[in-house]
Image (tube, rainbow, N blue to C red):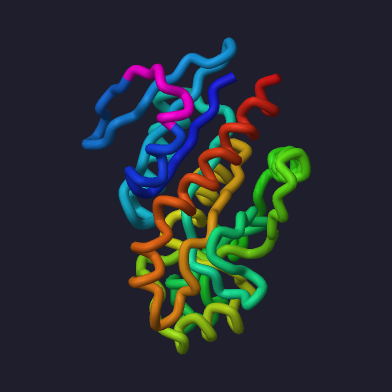
Amino acid sequence: MTIGIIGAMREEITPLLELYKDYDSVEIAGNIYYDINYKGSKIIVAYSKIGKVHAAITATIMILRFGCENIIFSGVAGGLSNDLKVGDLLLASSLCQHDVDITAFGHAMGFIPEGKLFYESDKKLCSLAKDIAGEMKLDIKEGIVASGDQFIASKDIKDSIIKEFGAIAVEMEGASVACVCDNFNVPFCIFRSISDSADGQASVSFDEFLESSASVSAKFVYNLINKLIS
C-alpha cells in the first residue's frame, strides 16, 4: 500500500518525519517528497506550500508519480465554531471552496460547473479515524471545512463563511486536495488541529500555537497509518 501525507507548511510535517526518522527524499517540480518504507508499505510525505494551487499540484504528483492509493492531509486550521478551541482535533466530513464566486452566472457560492460544491471525505478513513480517537481518548470533532486562498482574520468574513456553507473551520488547502482525489477516485481524509479562532486575534494565536497544534495532528496521523496498514 502507498499512502500520501500532505501538510501545507514545513512545520506541519516536521513532527511526522521525526516519528518515522528514516526516509529518502526526491525533488519534483520545486518541491521535496519524503519517501518512507514502513512495515511493508510506502509512505510519501510532503509539505505542499500554502494555498490551493500548491496543494493541488502536490496531491496530483503523489497520485500520478508515486501511485498513492490514499491521501491524508494533516495540519492546522482556524476554528469557526464556538465549540472548537485551540488544540482540538478536527475531521473534515466534507470540504468546500469558500472563495469561489461565479454567482453572477446563477451558480451557488463555491460551485464550479462540472465540479462539486462539497467534496465528501472517504467513509472508511473517517471510521478508522474515529477508532483511533477512541483509542487515544481524544474528542475528535467532525464537520464541514471551508478552504480559500486567504488567511481569515476578520469576524465579518468568518460569519459569512459560516452562514453560506455551515463550515466549522477554515483553512487554505483541503478542498483542492479533495477535488484532486475525487477526480482520480483516490480515498482521502483531511485532519486539522485547531490553531486559532479565525478572528481579529488570529495572526497572534496562529504563531503561538502552530507547533503544538501540528504535533497533535502528526501523532494522530501516525496512529492512523498504523491502523490502515495493519
Residue furthest top in the image: 40
User: For the point 55% across and 44% down, which residue is it?
Assistant: 183
Residue furthest left in the image: 30
Quadrant showing the N terminus: top right
Quadrant showing the C terminus: top right
Height in image: 87 above or below 110?
above
Question: Residue 143: x percent and y percent?
Answer: 67, 63
**Residue 2 visible, this orientation:** yes
User: For the point 62% across and 62% down, which residue is it?
Assistant: 118
Residue furthest bottom in the image: 156
User: For the point 63% across and 64% down, which residue is it?
Assistant: 144
Height in image: 48 above or below 227?
below
203 or 146, nearer to the observer: 203
Which segment did they paint magenta?
A: 17-24
Question: Residue 212: x percent and y percent?
Answer: 46, 52
Residue 220 placement, left or right of 35: right
112 or 71, nearer to the observer: 71
Height in image: 88 above or below 10?
below
Q: Is residue 46 magenta?
A: no
Residue 164 placement, left or right of 227: left
Question: Residue 81: x percent and y percent?
Answer: 62, 75
42 or 139, nearer to the observer: 139
Q: What is the quadrant of residue 206 in the picture?
A: bottom left
User: For the point 74% across and 46% down, which residue is it?
Assistant: 137
Residue 165 placement, left or right of 171: right
Residue 213 placement, left or right of 32: right
